[in-house]
Amino acid sequence: MKERILSGYDNFVLPFMIGMVFLCIYLLIGLIRILKHIPGPDRKKLALSFINPRIIYKDCRDILCDCLLHVKIFKRKALLGYMHASIAFGWFMIIVIGHIEVALYTPQRNGLIYYPVFFRYFTMENNHTLRGAFFFFLMDFFLLVILSGIALAMYKRVRSIALGMRRTTKPSLADRIGLYCLWAIFPLRLLAESFTAGISGGSFLTKPMNFLFANFLSNDYHILPTWWAYSTVLGTFLLVMPFTRYMHIPTEAFLILLRNAGLKVTRPRKGFAEAEIYACSSCGICLDACPMNMQKKNLKYSSVYFIRFLRRHNTRKINEIADKCLMCGKCVALCPVGVESCAIKRAQRSTVTDGLYYDYSYLKTLSPVPANPADVSETMTDKPVLYYAGCMTHLTPGISKAMKEIFRAAEIPYRFLDENGGICCGRPLMLAGKEKAARELVRKNTELIRAAGCDTLVLSCPICFKVFREEYDLQGITILHHTQYIENLIRKGKLKLNATSRSYVYHDPCELGRGAKVYEEPRRILERMGRLVKAEKEKEESICCGGSLGSLTLNYEDRIKITRGSLKALTYNHPDNIITACPLCLKTFAAQSPVKVMDIAQAVTENLEAIREPAASGTEKTQFGN
Amino acid sequence: MADFGYSLTPSSRIDLNKADRETFGKLVKLEPDVLKCMACGSCTASCTAGVYTRTSIRSAILYLQNGREKEALEFIKGCMLCGKCTIVCPRAINTRQLVLSICKIYNLK
């Protein structure tokens, strides 16, 4: 292997170099901008993360799995995963092998950016060696991998459902230019390398091309124009990249570093959020995920378009979408890049609502719950637990009644924090963006809970549960949702359930499932009571009930459509009952459901007989003895 | 003045010539549903904050319609946005957003 062009330069590298230099400058400025807008403590966290071996390991693993191999998409749909991974990983390998080739065969050209890209133009094989064969094989192999990915991508434009996507994003003009450039790069590379395959050597792809089209390809006059075309397309792609969705290629890796360092969204457009915005690949997986898209007219409210408008600084549209979102978190859970669009939407709402007037001076008048537990007898040895029903449970008193019965059946003393009316947990305010107001409620609630002096707090509402776990400082107090608590009681043998032949389907409330990752406890309880059937979509993919407090402006008619869609998915396997664990879901479903909807606590009390009968017979015995 | 144990009620007459109907018009444009309210009081009955203070969307809407913004705001300043009123509203008014919109448009401090 030796150099064919002694100067190591030809004019055709110019378009590529212009694109590359422009992109590098753009990225550098963007990097400085983001770092500048990250708050001081966060910047320190980021710096520290680079010396923490555990975080470094996590960074490397995430970059390999998410940016290059796209494991998350593979798990969802193998073909779609292959399409993304083939292009990303294949391209990455071509770049790496290109650099290895330069380092091995023409070490004097190390450091020239364009040299690895156009390596086969500048070198020639001398017939005595086959030293290049191994790397040429790899190069051709990965080129084939990429070409197969590109072919799939083209097919996806025509029939996206074949790759598991019902709907895809409508590309913007810049996206289209980028897309067509990307499609053209690799076929042109194949063509260009096929020309020189006779001179610089090639492998199973480029060599046969060279032979097959001998008449056309062996004509030396055609060599330069194809290399020019290849370089121009590549340069154009790099040049338009900052204005297209392909910006996610460099940004995603950077976002992983920021995320693993533990950074959070603080402002809707700057700092960490900016990294998230540019990391969005506009893939459109969130389109199928969004429960609002039961109706086609609501497609425009999807996270992908929200991010697009953020990039364009279109404030009116940004606010419209931010206020409409249900905050169910499904798009975040399914996003292959992990863009936390809900957090950005919350920050955006905050810019509008946080300054609005409020007056919570009445909080001072609230007094702690009476010190003696509501329902204690001397036989109870356990420490009392604190029960907080929450606003929504007061609209569905069946749940708190059921909880009381469960406490009684398990002989656990309890204190009911808001039996005669409490205050809100603060999560609805946070969802609406009123952080400052929410903090006042958080402070007051913390005070009330501390004053009650219990070390377990049981909650019936997942909305409260999430905020108590994440935003409250309640060290030393175990915070449990009632599904977890009941499951605990069953495991300890304090509650015994009748096994019935009824079939149940469980609806994962957004805040409990995706929000707090409680998926298994309710299912274990239901398996003890009857037959648990699957819903069409469940766990991470469960569909919002439509009643979510997250949305500010979604109207009643649209909500009803979501509720019906969600119910359709739940009743997929014809269950006898729909079980949920959220008072809001219960309330929303109950009005529309064809089958009976119950909270898990209510379902448990229905099947409690087994333990209460022995207790009853116990009293009879003593009566008999007397 | 002698204390009879009772007194005259202050006049509840509303001078709509003086009242600011323009701002209410803006609110109606943003939240047309405000006109759907039939003052049933479900929102007030279910209100979490209503246990401690005079929070009531129903009254706020009535007062706004009568051009008495200051009094109206008294009825919503304690709102915690818990959303119960929206769920119980028989006219499907998005009361939760209405509270935010009123605060936004009237911008009272």
Image (tube, rainbow, N blue to C red):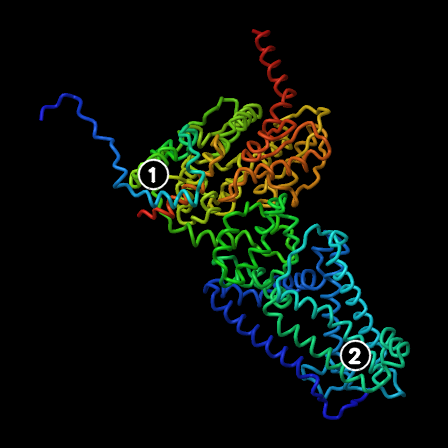
Question: A253 or A222, which lies in front?
Answer: A222
Q: Is residue B13 above or below residue A297?
A: above
> Of all residues shown, which one is farthest toward the bottom?
A6
Question: A5 or A171, which lies in front?
Answer: A171
Which disc, if any, is residue A192? 2
Give, as a three-letter code, the residue at label 1: Leu
User: Is residue A148 rendered to the left or right of residue A286?
Assistant: right
Same chain check for tags 1 and 2:
no
Locate the N terminus of chain B by quadrant: top left
- Which residue is at a point 87% across and 73% down the rendered structure image? A204
Q: Image quadrant of residue A499?
A: top right
Residue A319 appearing in the image: yes
User: Is residue A386 rendered to the left or right of residue A98?
Assistant: left
Give, as a three-letter code, the residue at label 2: Ala
Subunit under mark 2: A
| Image spot of residue B50 (x, y percent) | 38, 32
The residue that mark 1 highlights is B64
Q: Is residue A352 above or below residue A520?
A: below
Which disc, if any, is residue A511? none
User: Is residue A87 rendered to the left or right of residue A616?
Assistant: right
- Which residue is at a point 58% across and 60% down the rendered structure image? A260
| Image spot of residue B26 (x, y percent) | 38, 46
Question: A60 or A166, which lies in front?
Answer: A166
> Mark 1 falls on what kind of element?
helix
> Mark 2 falls on what kind of element?
helix
* Image mark count: 2
- Which residue is at a point 34% across and 33% down the rendered structure image? B54
Q: Is residue A310 above or below residue A563?
A: below
> Of all residues shown, which one is farthest toward the front?
B17
Mark 1: few/some/many CA within 10 Å (<14, 14-19, 20+) = many
Q: Determine whether label 1 and label 2 are within 8 Å by CB.
A: no
Subunit under mark 1: B
